[in-house]
Amino acid sequence: MIMKKKILKLTQAIGLLALMSFTIAPPQKIKIWMIGDSTMCLYPTRQYPIAGWGMPFANYFDASVSVHNHARGGRSTRTFLSENLWQPVADSLQEGDYVFIQFGHNDEAKEPQYAARYTSVPDYKTNLIKFITETRAKKAVPILVTPVSRRKFDKDGNAEETHVEYTKAVFEVGAQYKVTVIDLDKKSRELYQTLGPKRVQYLAMALDTGEHPNYPFGQKDNTHFNEYGARRMAEIVLNDIKAQHLELADRFVKGMNAPKVNPQVK
Amino acid sequence: MSFLLPPDHITLYMAGDSTMSIKEVKAYPETGWGMPFKAFFDQTVTVDNKARNGRSTKSFIAEGLWASIADNLKEGDYVIIEFGHNDEVPSKATYTPPAEYTANLVRFITETRAKKANPILLTPVARRKFNAQGVIQGTHDLYSELVRKVAADQQVPLIDLDKESQALVQQYGPDDSKFLYDYVDPGENPNYPQGKADDTHFSELGARKMAEIVLADIRSLKLGLADRIVKPRFMPAATKKP
């Protein structure tokens, strides 16, 4: 009798599985590729607590997504190409993959010592278009991200725009090529404004002398993030993916206290 | 593997609760202070963080977690011991009355020293609790005092993390101290769709700040371990572009 029940249960389970295979195909495995500069890249332990926003970003996708962060400190669109950092990504792309593109900090550097990385606005646009075109040639999806804002306040405590021309260029390319644009420049600046000049330091690579063994003389800059700031930037990008209803949002981790939703109802 | 380790290699064990433990990715951004702490040491040190959410001295022993440290200790190793959050609550199954808590700490010390390893006692890290005047309130007074007494009686290096973290949280104040703890707005983070306001567990920032307190004390106590703190490889790069 017990055996019979078990067999019946097993048969039901198999039947249900067979039915499910028609309705819910397992999600296709995809890769997210990240190309950009030091504000996005991975850092080794010996440089902690500096963090690129790509580091925490990778923690918020489900098992169908793997994140490949190819961003590199100091790179502009031009040097990312000239150093052959793009080609390996382009060669690896598969249908359904995403490429997150965030440059600008080094492209816009006009000071003489940065001549080797400086990229004029027209060249910057040409390079972004190359990333887009070659991504689409592989049936992958490019996402443009405006360069995350530097932390700069005027004397009245207003967060100032720090990438005006280059962010505008990202939007122009985005509109022309119908590419999703995540306006990290604006949204990060809005967060800085909310926090104000003092609290914004909680996001920053700001260390006192002797505070952290990796930086015995302390550290302070207006561009890079600590682990906390990097996560706040990653959250901005994640929430914009959701707000723009990209398919990628379906691949976020499901939160621990998320309301339970019947997948078949969805 | 073992012959690849430097000859003076040691293991730094961490025994404690959720304020110290390594979190699962699905719990991020909640961070135990042992996570950033690990990055502070050079390659002669392996940091083995055995801290586990919800544990008291009593349950840490009962579940064999202490044995997993004691059985593997070698001469020259260190054991950092921080309990209290789950010992001190009478309504919890993990409740450990004061006398038993003291006895358990003494046991950790004795068994560590029997292996010629070095115990370090920590008072339990502060919770974020302010009174109406904005003054931080101690929440582990009794158990922190027990730790101090054991440390004095047994001549064990003491890091008064409760006191020092309270001072830090006070410095941040009632509002800004939320940046140190696991505070997430609704809709901000995929792991906590409905938000989170946790006055016990840390954000990445708070965990690192707590780890920095412990590190500073390892230096000021002039423990041998201080010689194994990582040497900077990169000099300040304040003028460098991204």
Image: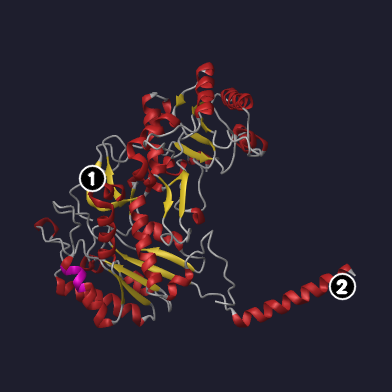
**Label 2 lies in what chain?**
A
Question: What stretch of residues is rendered in magenta?
Answer: A165-169
Q: What x and y, as percent, mark residue B137?
A: 44, 33
Q: Which residue is mark 1?
A: A220
Decide which of tag 2 and tag 1 comes sooner along the chain.
2
Query: Seen from this angle, which residue lies furthest front?
Result: B132
Q: Which residue is mark 2?
A: A4
Q: What x and y, as percent, mark residue B145?
A: 51, 24
How far is mark 2 from mark 1, CA to CA?
Answer: 71 Å
Q: Is residue A252 magenta?
A: no
Image-based side of B38 in relation to A124, left or right: right
Q: What x and y, as percent, mark residue A123?
A: 17, 73
Q: Amino acid at mark 2?
A: Lys
Helix, strand or loop at disc 1? strand
Query: Seen from this angle, which residue lies furthest right?
Result: A1
Query: Number of marks in the image?
Result: 2
- Mark 2 near mark 1, Cβ–Cβ under 8 Å? no
Image-based side of B114 in relation to A110, left or right: right
Instruction: Give the position of the C terminus of chain B as an image quadrant.
Output: bottom left
Q: Image quadrant of residue A42? A: bottom left
